[in-house]
Amino acid sequence: MKTALITGGTGGLGRALAPLLIARGYQLGITYLIPAEAETLETELQPDPDQVLLRRVDSSDPEAVTAFAKDAAERFGSIDALVALVGGWAGGTDVEDTDDVRFERMLDLNLRSTFYSVRAVLPYLREVGKGRIVTVGSRAAIDNPYGQAAFNVAKAGVVALTKSVANELRGTEITANALLPSVIDTPATREAMPYADYVDWPTPAEIAGVIAFMLSEEAAVMNGATVPVYGNT
């Protein structure tokens, strides 16, 4: 049985991905920050306690992330994959109006959280000798829309990190690829964009299916890829 760590796994995308991976035989280590989200996931999954390790972890704290990876590896015997879902968006300001707090928040949520998670998991993947890393960048990392420079920079950093790791892993059976979502059809997104036409937005379940493929043996030839999941937006 393989083990996957999902950071930020109690959000909309994580709640779609977790049951899919459990159905495919994975053991899961899942981090969360908001207790209510963890309670919702537990209710939905009703997981076998031997199959899921759910823990509150601040992914911007490198020591906490390293400790969780260590505990998961000891609990399950190995780590075979990482899906780094932790992230967040902030917009509404141009570069000259972006204060340090907002900029650092975007770096913490998106880039540092991903860096710490990848760094913590790599030794366990190397120990297994094969594995998968999936990070979450953004369409904004490429398109760089106005009014959200801090987010754009942080997500571009995630893409650069992923490609750097992929290059470091060449010649091994460990791969690193970045998913690039645009707008995802979640209740929170609909609430934030009440007048948008959401019919063409990809759903969390659809994107979870892409992630599951990226973790599969069939995706062994993918390394350093940026995978767009824009729907028809």
Image (tube, grey):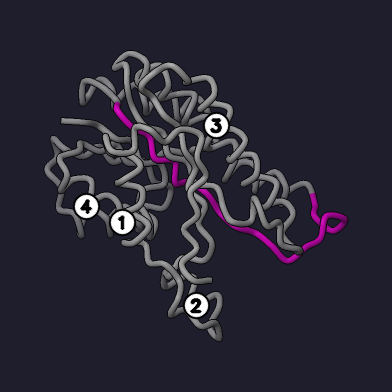
| Picture quadrant of residue 215 | top left
Pick out the residue farthest to the bottom.
195
Q: Is residue 162 above or below residue 193?
A: above
> Around disc 4, counting alpha carbons within 10 Å, would you say few (fewer than 14), some (14 to 19), or many (20 or more)?
some
Name the residue tied to disc 4: 19
**Is 163 a magenta residue?**
no
> Circle 4 sits in a helix, a strand or a loop, which is it?
helix
Q: Earlier in the sequence, mark 4 or mark 2?
A: 4
Q: Earlier in the sequence, mark 3 or mark 2?
A: 3
* Residue identifier under label 3: 115
Q: Dot 1, how many residues are within 10 Å of its Cα: few (below 14), some (14-19), or many (20+)?
A: many
Q: Earlier in the sequence, mark 1 or mark 2?
A: 1
Q: Secondary structure at mark 2?
A: helix
Residue at (30% x, 57% y) in the render: 16
Marks 1,4: beta carbons within 8 A: yes
Sequence-first disc among 1 and 3: 1
Residue found 68% across the figure and 57% down from its top? 143
Q: CA distance from mark 1 to mark 3?
A: 22 Å
Q: Looking at this view, is 55 or 30 the one in front?
A: 30
Q: Earlier in the sequence, mark 3 or mark 4?
A: 4
